[in-house]
Amino acid sequence: MPVCPTLFGGSADLTGSNNTRVADHTIFDHGNYGGTYIHYGVREHGMAAAMNGIALHGGAIPYGGTFMVFTDYCRPSIRLSALMEQRVIYVMTHDSIGLGEDGPTHQPVEHLAALRVMPNLFVFRPGDAVETAEAWQTALEAKATPSILALSRQGLAQFRHGDMAENKTAKGAYVAVDCDGARQITLLASGSEVGIAIEAQKQLADSGINAAVVSVPCLDLFAMQDATYRQQVLGKTPRIAVEAGLRQSWDWLLGETDSFIGMTGFGASAPIDDLYNHFGITADAIVVAAKRQIG
């Protein structure tokens, strides 16, 4: 808040789960019109509509949180944020089957793909704390484009260390972990699946296969980069995309012989590790697919 005092936060009755309130926030209500955080209640569409109004009024940068699956309720207002070119930031947590026992009603599988097709909307799915900070920076600097920050429920291992001079998330995708020697296959992943791809890379290296891991926190921004940069990142080798969602938004990066490891239907109710194993979103599955592709 001291760094960006114009931020005006809130949540649709999920503050404790979204972690959208910080210590410097005071509550906006009838007794304190100077507050910087609002409890919107269980009204996701109303929250999103109100944030559009705050952005249009000017003077504050609104952000609000709920679960990723509830973007269904917010969608009309998200679309208007994009259409009206307003800097509204949607913090959507519990972004995959990784939320576990809440089950398929709360597990978003089609939502990333559905949001990525919306014009003038940045959909970020960061894979660690550095990418999350970079996504926030990029969203704040996008004065005519709203943003979705799709964040996991589970804690994620840090894979960015000591390379924070450049906002790599702002380019949409980048080589997170390169290989030793000539690249034989490229592993593309977003969010919580970047760590799985890095583990697969280690296993492939043990088998003498050189794989590069490309983190793709924002497909929208990557599509906006020039062809030379995209080619440098993607290389000319076979590709495997990994995401705990549906495939459709990745198809422009995948050829007919490339692979996608993710969801093909709805989720299920079980602990997170059981779910990832059940649906085959694992390092072992990536290794099998990689060996198959490169023969």
Image (cartoon, grey):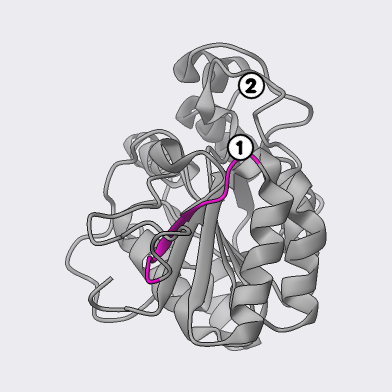
Q: Quadrant of residue 90?
A: bottom right
Amino acid on which disc 2 is placed = Phe
Quadrant where the N terminus sits is bottom left
Q: Is 38 contained in the magenta span?
A: yes
Q: Which residues are magenta?
A: 34-42
In the drawing, what numbered circle is on residue 279? 2
Point out residue 150 in the picture as x, y percentages from the top left corner.
Answer: 54, 52
- Report if the CB atoms under discs 1 and 2 are less than 8 Å apart: yes
Point out residue 129 in the picture as x, y percentages from the top left corner.
Answer: 31, 55
Chief SS of the magenta region: loop
Q: Quadrant of residue 135?
A: bottom left
Q: Residue at x 25, y 78 (%)?
A: 3
Point out residue 23 in the picture as x, y percentages from the top left corner.
Answer: 23, 55
Q: How busy is the neighbourhood of tag 1: few (under 14 within 10 Å), some, or many (20 plus)?
A: many
Q: Residue at x 68, y 45 (%)?
A: 43
Point out residue 7 in the picture as x, y percentages from the top left corner.
Answer: 41, 73
274 relative to 138, above or below = above
Residue to which mark 1 is pinned: 244
Instruction: Depth check: give the residue in front, 59 or 176.
Output: 59
Amino acid on which disc 1 is placed = Ala
Q: Secondary structure at mark 2?
A: loop
